[in-house]
Image (spheres, helix red, strand yellow):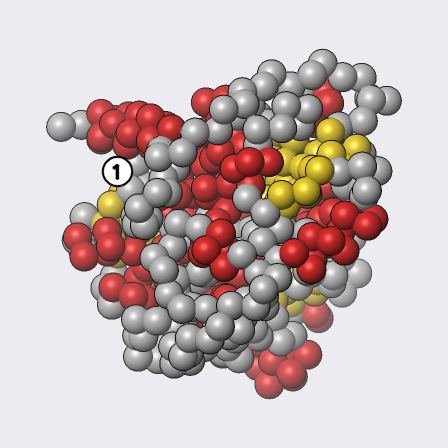
Amino acid sequence: MTQAVNRRRFIKRSVAATAGLWFVGCRTQPRKQSANDKLNIAVIGVANQGSYNLSNVAGENIVALCDVDDTYLAAAAQKFPQAKTYNDFRRLLDQRDIDAVVVATPDHTHAVAAVAALRSGRHVYCEKPLARTISETRTITEMARRHKRVTQIGTQIHAGTNYRRVVELVQSGAIGAVREVHVWVAASYGGKNRPKGELVPKNIHYDLWLGPVEHRPYSPEYLPFNWRHWWAFGGGALADFGCHYLDLPHWALGLTHLLSAEVVDGPPVDSESTPPWLIVRYEYPARGDRPPVTLTWYHGGKQPSLLGSELTAKWKSGVMFVGGKGMLLSDYGRHLLLPEKDFKGFVPPPPFIKDSIGHHKEWIEACKSGGPTTCGFEYSGPLTEAALLGNVAFRTGRRLEWDWRLMKAANARESDAFVYHHYREGWKI
C-alpha cells in the first residue's frame, strides 16, 4: 500500500468523522465583505489568554461568547452585552450570524472546537499549540485546507519586528549556511503527582471543560491555570513554548517536516505529568540547496554549552543559529551576531520582510479580503507537529524515525499511543 493511499485514507476518515456523535447543524458561507465591514466574531474561552485575544478582536462585532466558567463568562458579557453567551461551544456554532471564531481553550479542546468551527464554514484563529496530539493537528490542518477558510495560530511573536530582522539575516547569508540550531526556554511544568478529587465549584461546568478527555475527578490543580502540567490536557513547556521559539528557525530556514526526534536527556517518564526539564534533538532534511539541519531543544533551565557563562546568564531563553560564517543569537525582542569581533561594522541587509499590521489584524483583514495570513494552519500545522513529536519521543523512550506522510514512526509502533488522539464516548472530530 502506498504512502499516498494511506494518507488519503487518514484524511478521509478524519473528515468523515467530524460528524461525530454530535452534529453542528449550522453551515455557513462567509459573507462577502469590504474592508470597512466588521466581522461577526465568536470567542470560545474568554478569560486569561482568551481575554487577551478578545481584547485584540474587540474592534469587530463580538456576537457570541463561550466559557465553561460562569464567572468568567459573566465578566466578559458585561463588556460585550450584545453578544449571546454559551457554556457549550457546540451550541454557539449553531448561531447563524457568526463569520469567524477564536478558539482560546486549553489544548485538549482545541481540536474539537476548531474542527467544528471549520466544518461549519467559519474562519478560525486558534491558540497554540494547534492541538494536544499530532493526529488532531493533522486533522485541523487538512480541514482548513479542505474548506478553504482563513486561519491563524496564536504565535503573536511572529508579528514582531525582531523576528523579521533575524529571518532576513539568516536568509541573506549573514552567517552562512546553517546546519545547527539550538532552542531553549526557561519555562518548566510538570513533575507532579495526580491530585485528589474535590467538589466542583458551582460556577464551573466541569464535564464541558473535560470535553473529549476521559473523566477524572475535578481538582483546582487542573483549572483554570495549571492544566499544562498534565498529559491529559497539555504537553508542558515544549507544547507551550515550542510554537513560539521553533517558529523562528522554521521561518528562517524553511523547515517543515521532520526526519527524526530523540531525547538527549531528561527525567524519568511519568504517565500523568509532563517533564519539568528536557533536551530533545530533531533532524530536518535538506530543502533544495539548503543543507540538513540538526535542532536541539532545551527547557526547564537547561541551555546549550556553546553559550558560555556570560551569555548563559543574559539569555535565559533564546534561539542560536550556527552557520558557516558565524552564529546568530535571538529571543523575542533582541538579536546578536557572534563572535561580536567578527561582525564589527557589519551592515545588515535592507529590510525585505514587510512589517506586520498586527497578528490578530492580519487574520481579521484576511477574513474580509480572502488574502493570506503569516501563520495559517498550512504553516503552523507542521510547526505544531514538530513540537509535539519531541514529547512523543520522550514518552516512548525511543529515537523516532518519522514518516510524516504516514504519520508514523516506522521503528517504534508503540509511539502510536501518543501520536493519535483517543476520545471518550460522545466526542469525535
Q: Secondary structure at mark 1?
A: loop
> Considering only vertical position in the picture, is 339 above or below 173?
below
Q: Quadrant of residue 112?
A: top left
Instruction: Return the residue nearer the eye: 155 or 350.
Output: 155
- Residue 151: percent from the left, percent from the top? 59, 33
Q: Quadrant of residue 37?
A: top right
Residue visible at 42% across and 75% down in the picture: 197
Question: Is there any visible trace of residue 17 in the rendered image?
Answer: yes
Residue visible at 83% across and 48% down in the picture: 79
> Considering only vertical position in the picture, is 349 above or below 162?
above
Q: Quarter holding the C terminus? A: top left
In the picture as drawn, the residue positioned furthest to the bottom comes out as 309
- Residue 191: percent from the left, percent from the top? 42, 80
Give the labeled residue for mark 1: 406
Q: Is residue 156 left or right of residue 393?
A: right
Q: Is residue 239 left or right of residue 313?
A: left
Q: Amino acid at mark 1?
A: Leu
Q: Is residue 167 left or right of residue 247?
A: right
Q: How many marks?
A: 1
Task: Categorize mark 1 by other alpha carbons within 10 Å: few (<14), some (14-19), many (20+).
Answer: some
Q: Quarter holding the N terminus? A: top left
In the picture as drawn, the residue positioned furthest to the top comes out as 32
Residue visible at 55% across and 36% down in the picture: 91
> Considering only vertical position in the picture, is 222 above or below 195?
above
Q: Is residue 413 left or right of residue 77?
A: left
